Image (spheres, rainbow, N blue to C red):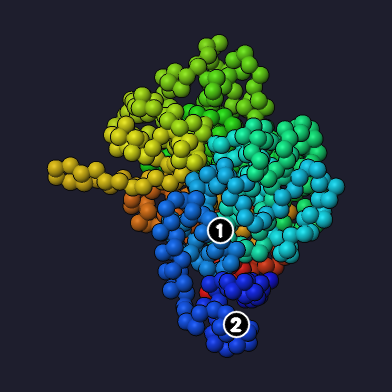
Amino acid sequence: MSSSSRALSRLRALAANCSPPPEGLSFTPEQRIAKNLTGLIPHVLEGNDRQCERALKMIRTRQTNIDKYLYLSNLKSQNVDLFYRLLIDHSKELMPIVYTPTIGDVCLQYSTLYTRPEALYISIKQRKSLKTILRNWPYPNPEICVVTDGSRILGLGDLGINGVGIPIGKLALYTAAAGIHPDKTLPIVLDCGTANEANLKDPLYLGLRAKRVPIAEQQEFMDEFMQAAAEVYPEMVVQFEDFESEKAFNYLDRYRNNYKCFNDDIQGTGAVVLGGYIGAVNLSGVPVEEQRLVFMGAGSAGVGVAKQLVEYYTKRGLSEQAAKDKFWLVDTKGLVTKDRGDKLAEHKKYFARTDNNGHQFRSLEEVIEYVKPTALVGLTATHGVFTESVVRALKASVDAGGLGRRPILFPLSNPLTKAECTFEQAVAWTDGTVIFASGSPFSQFTVKTSDHAVTYYPNQGNNVYVFPGIGLGAILSKASRVTDNMIYTSAAALAGSLNAEEIHKGLIYPRIERVREASLIVAREVMKAARRDGVSQLPEEQWLEWEEWGDPALDKYIKARIYDPQL
């Protein structure tokens, strides 16, 4: 459905209530007459800038981020082009409203905030009707789907059907960052019940009022969903989001070789952290062979990131075992070791240490004292776990290696209320030497002394730098599956996307205002990786033409196929 058709249908639907949406203000006099809109909208004729100005004023006068989100959600339902024009042109201001950190609060209150459907809501009780439900989606042939079962939403736990806010917000970023047309996106929540007692007791809760069904039954339901989705929408890429850790790894391993799918929590997070880590290692002054990494958090994201960084080292000549030996993972029980005495989750076994000589290290402080790391990564969803003593111990271990060395500190948990430490704390506790990246946005700040001022610039290791480009690259290359090499290539492409100004400032990620430009670079390189891996189903003649004319020709192909809303 074209933008003008959507606009007209909404105008006519709302005209009966004397409430036309704002997009009508850009219709020409001829269009107003042809569409019988005269008198149904104000006489004024407005251009793009004025419409954006009015919308931004409305957003900025809202008192809370939830109110801003609700205004934007309503705007998206009435004037999708204006919504995305704002989100593209004001990404730094509005992405934190549309997605993290605001989306966490939205999910917590979703059943209360609900006013209209924005996704497919599929209950396990409807499993016999999966294909019918998928075909009910009003926009034909979606190209990208984000699906969750709400079992592990950000660091907030099991939110059940309320977790649907995550696919909705995530797909808005696919459109804003990579230009995938909004009509080609499909958010889905699979409702298998919830372990959240507050939801079960809430009379307004929209999901099944039952405990989650057994894991085996959930897997059967997921098998049926994947089969139905592939049959109904054979060209659609499926992105898994916010499944509980064990299921996340299981589903990725189970489906990755037979379906067009990837998991952003595992692979996307790993890629975006790797992209930043490549730059951080270059800035740290610590040789690659001396790098040692401690991970606080050993869930799906933590292990996914660590595995992606293992590949960084194997591509530099280390054996897989030598690369793996650079990583020490810590969970709530301490250092993950083979002989700790508890039953390790399957995904943790890969990094379980065997060189601890029977000694168990129960706290992060003990592990840092033992390992002497050069980098500390947090994916714990536990606010403040990187204390002053922890961060100063990290700095001390780096300083002991020689002059000019800098510690790498990545507190990556979302939302901000779950961040392991703040940017200002990291700067203060490392005397300004830290190479910092966080999961949620922090602001730059300036420290003034008597004779000069120093401005410190944070980095945000936001998955939005990679997952839109991975999705777009998979779609445009017509990839039959998403390979590990496509994921790794997205990270390397991100690391190479910084411009001269960003490099000069010591950044390890592009400014968020350049996310669309970075996504194009990521998509291009992901497409090329798909071809190298033999999974691109584009004609070979097309690839030979791009090889002859180089990246500009491929860039032109991509740009001609992405959504750029014009009001």
Residue displayed at 55% across by 19% down: 333
Residue displayed at 30% across by 34% down: 428
Q: Is residue 291 left or right of residue 270?
A: left
Disc 2 crowd rating (10 Å Cα; few below 14, some 14-19, many 20+) is some
Give the mark toward the camera: 1 or 2. Answer: 2
Q: Amino acid at mark 2?
A: Leu
User: Badges 1 and 2: C-beta atoms under 8 Å apart?
Assistant: no
**Residue 262: x, y in percent?**
66, 46
Up/down of 502 relative to 546, above or below = above
Residue displayed at 81% across by 39% down: 220
Q: In whole angstroms, how far apart are the C-alphas of marks 1 and 2?
A: 25 Å
Q: Amino acid at mark 1?
A: Ser
**Which quarter of the figure has residue 484?**
top right
Residue displayed at 63% across by 84% down: 36
One can see residue 117 in this view: yes
Q: Is residue 361 left or right of residue 527?
A: left
Up/down of 396 relative to 270, above or below = above
Instruction: From the image, tell me which residue sits under label 2.
Output: 37
Q: Considering the numbered disc 2 on the image, is that residue within a helix, a strand or a loop? A: loop
Q: Is residue 291 left or right of residue 236?
A: left
**Residue 266: x, y in percent?**
60, 40
Instruction: From the image, tell me which residue sits under label 1.
Output: 73
In the picture as drawn, the residue positioned furthest to the left comes out as 450
Q: From the image, which quarter does the N terminus lie in?
A: bottom right
Q: Considering the numbered disc 1 on the image, is that residue within a helix, a strand or a loop? A: helix
**Residue 489: x, y in percent?**
57, 49
**Which quarter of the figure has residue 563?**
bottom right
Q: Going from the N terminus, do you reach mark 1 or mark 2 first?
A: 2
Q: Is residue 374 left or right of residue 186?
A: left
Disc 1 crowd rating (10 Å Cα; few below 14, some 14-19, many 20+) is some
Up/down of 297 relative to 149, above or below = above
One can see residue 533 in this view: no
